[in-house]
Image (cartoon, helix red, strand yellow):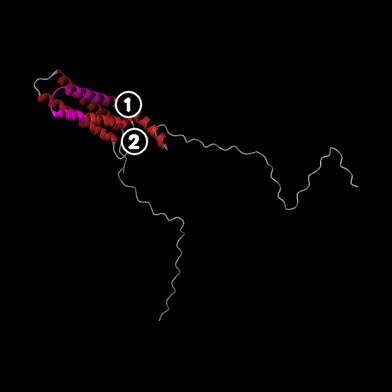
Amino acid sequence: MAPKAAKGAKTEPAPPPAGAKPQEDKKDDKEPLEKPQKLVQPKHEVGTRKGCRRYRWELKDSNKEFWLLGHAEIKILSLGCLIAAMILLSSLSVHPILTLIITMEISIFSFFIIMYSFAVHRYIPFILWPISDLFNDLFACAFLVGAVVFAVRSRRSMHLHYLLAVILIGVAGVFALIDVCLQRNNFRGKRAKKHMLISPPGKEKEPQQGKGPEPAKPPEPAKGKK
């Protein structure tokens, strides 16, 4: 009879059969998943922002430029003067051309204020907005000065409200001229890029994917002499 194993002795496990793969140690040594690093966006450029993030950046940058450079204050003052002049002239019988010029300039100033305040112009890049604003200020100054001259010449005696309205129209024209000077300061030190309007050279045709090189044609057999 085989001797009994002593108490407390450890029994050795049976060896694995030949050809069997050793079992892998089951350990929870899972490496922590690397968190994707957030892409740092530049503060002074739009970078790769898209959607709402891009619009928030464009809105902030547009208003910062619009208010800090003084364009917003000038346009709002001009708009206020024109609205006040319109209210004063509404109780008087005036020439329709004065009402037309004031209404037109109120609409144009309101348009530019809305465009810059809501950063709409950033999404319409095919229009040169600084140049458009510069020409608008020049034409606004010319129209408003012409309206003042026409209003003074068309009446010999002026009512108090009429006189105040004419003064306010002239002040709005002066503000438009000041905005022209502010626009000129933005163009200083800026040069147009060379070849800006030249179309880029055509790209060479790349070989289509999935198609290998064409097989070489076998040489033609030499024709024997007759």
Q: Is residue 115 visible?
A: yes
Q: At 26% across and 26% down in the image, what residue appears?
A: 75
| N-term-proximal mark, 1 vs 2 | 1
The quadrant in which residue 108 appears is top left
Q: Count the marks.
A: 2
Q: Which residue is mark 2?
A: 122
Residue 203, horizontal then vertical, whole percent: 37, 51
Q: Is residue 218 above or below residue 159?
A: below
Left/right placement of residue 224 relative to residue 79 reads right
Outermost residue on the bottom side: it is: 226
Q: Report the span colored magenta.
A: 76-103
The quadrant in which residue 158 appears is top left
Question: Which is nearer the eye, 3 or 145?
Answer: 3
Q: Is residue 119 above or below residue 202?
A: above
Residue 74, horizontal then vertical, whole percent: 27, 25
Q: Is residue 207 above or below residue 12?
A: below
